[in-house]
Image (cartoon, coloured by chain):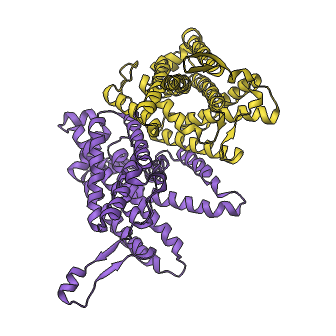
Chain colours: A yellow, B purple
Amino acid sequence: MLEQQLVNGLTLGVIYALIAVGYTMVYGVIELINFAHGEIYMLGAFFCATFITALGLPLWLAIPLAMLCCSLLGIMIDVVAYRPLRNAHRLAALITAIGMSIFLQNLAMVIWGSRPRAFPQDAVPAVLAEQAFSFGEVTITWLHLFIFGITFSMMIGLYLIIAKTRIGTAMRALAQNRTCCQLQGINVNRVISFTFALGSAMGAMAGILVAMFYNTLYPTMGYVAGVKAFAAAVLGGIGSVPGAMFGGIVLGIAEALGAGYVSSLYRDGVAYAVMIAVIIFRPSGILGKALVDKA
Amino acid sequence: MNKKIALPLLAVACILPFMPFTSEYMLHVFTLVMVYMVLAMGLNIVPGFCGLLDLGFVGFYGIGAYTAGLLTINYGLSFWVIVPFAALNGALWGILLGAPTLRLTGDYFAIVTFGFSELVVLFLTNEIWLTRGPLGLPGIDPVSIDLSFISKALNPAWDWYYEFDGELPYFFLALVMVLVIYGVMRRLEDSRLGRAWYAIREDPLAASSCGVNILNYKVIAFAISAGIGAVGGCFFARWTLFLSPDMFKFWESFLVLCMVVLGGLGNINGALIGAAVLVALGEVLRVVLPELGLPVETRFLFYGLIMILIMRFKPSGFLPRIAATGMQNPIIQDLKKRLDRERAAA
């Protein structure tokens, strides 16, 4: 069943990549590990499920709406929690990020309860659960393909935004040097808000996909996924968007292999071990440039 | 802390358990405060003195606690023998983790320590043959003072053996622990070692060009910090008499880090205040929330919110460290005063 594990690992890997992109972009522009990003991912799944069950929206409408809500939430988190601390000690912002993560996680627990819930299956087209291809013992469902399709189209869209648009150029410039951007008349806060919105939308999408894949969502799901996505971002070189995509996929496969060959109990441990090893031997990540220490 | 404040505080602490209003529960909370004071002082060394963010402190706390628990259960060793063992084990792991990773700076180091603490929790959860995994480790013996080998030698009828029972003896043991570690920290702060740490924190490049071996001093700092964390864990194990991997999750690291930052990074008194405030806040919320008709589970919600607010309005903590040790030097302070006077006169 290792091949099947690999397929599942790869599917999870692209989802990690989707979350990792959010971490890496925020780190790129403000050099902050946004610990609340995992919670955005969790809230994306909850918003989507709630829009379907409470408002009766169809899936194709609930997904963009959930992404929009998470984008707004991402911007709000930045404005309320991180912006006032832009010039304070780095640790202060980091603690605020962790505080925000704990706050959002517990808020979700208060609103939706702490028990895992099922993703509303009647809203999901039945065809997704069906088999699309099979090679020997490996089965690829339409859901796998759906996840791949969505993820890759979002990645390409993100690439186009970063590479081709004015605001994308501003983001890249901001990652290089904030003071210079200000001197050039770039509205730095607006670019940072845009980065948060973009990263949060992708994180929300990842949450929805995972909730559909496992058919379950719970308020603490953001923690482990967030950590793994962060590991993926580090693995690929933090601050580098292609690195985050690459890191996510590598991590997903490493996890599948680790669970298959080493021990399934240490499934989550693989992510941490890989992360520590990469940081020790290649601190700038596999695709990253050597980082000048700005601490 | 000068003697004028410290001695009365100590006196209050000694009388407190005997006050009529002090319940067993309050004693428990006081002891908990002191456990966190130890942890906060231990963690303070790394981010406070050396300026490195350590998100994995709870790993060493867990290692200390499980070392104590397992040695007690499997070999029946006494608390007094286990404390140095636990401290050495913690320091050893600190060196093992620190030596290859302390070259890293800033966030990368933070991430490695975080990964380490998560691996410790996974190890404690999964290695069931050693730790009983998620079931936890019950049946740890309480602390005891066994001087019967002396008393029996003096008079065969005497048996000087005392097993800790209830919260009171633990309160005083914790108090002694806090005092000892506080003393050690004060000595460290003003030692060659402490000055080297401050130099590294303020300007690593300048420090290294003055001949300070940065990596060595950082590894020493990390090992001492880990050792103190393990001592805290050791006490915790012999006090609660039960351990489970859940007690050593990332949340604890965050809590201790908050105490350190809230109190004022690099300030030993600040670490004490931070520990007292945050433990008290947790307990107050536990009592207040049901009164307001909110479930107790929501207290972390407020905890997170309060942390954000404190950081928003007091980003450098309650007792910001005024300057590096050099500025606290009486000669420099005297010079500063004279300078101010001259400026005022001019």
Residue in view at x 72 percent, y 31 percent: A48
Classify residue B144 by image quadrant.
Answer: bottom left
Identity of the residue furthest to the right in this view: A56
Q: Position of residue A7 (x, y in %)?
A: 53, 22
How many numbered circles are shown? 0
Q: Tell me if residue B305 comes above or below residue A80 in the rendering.
A: below
Front-most of A272 and A200? A272
Q: Position of residue B293 (x, y in %)?
A: 73, 60
Q: Is residue B268 visible?
A: no
Q: Position of residue B101 (x, y in %)?
A: 31, 36
Identity of the residue furthest to the front in this view: A136
Q: Position of residue B32 (x, y in %)?
A: 46, 64
Q: Is residue B75 left or right of residue A220?
A: left
Quarter of the image that includes the C terminus of chain A? top left
Q: Is residue A233 visible?
A: yes
Q: Is residue B108 left or right of residue A113?
A: left
Classify residue B162 by image quadrant.
Answer: bottom left
Q: Tell me if residue B157 comes above or below residue A274 in the rendering.
A: below
Front-most of B251 and B152? B152
Classify residue A70 by image quadrant.
Answer: top right
Q: Tell me if residue B244 comes above or below residue A220 in the rendering.
A: below
Residue in view at x 28 percent, y 50 percent: B91
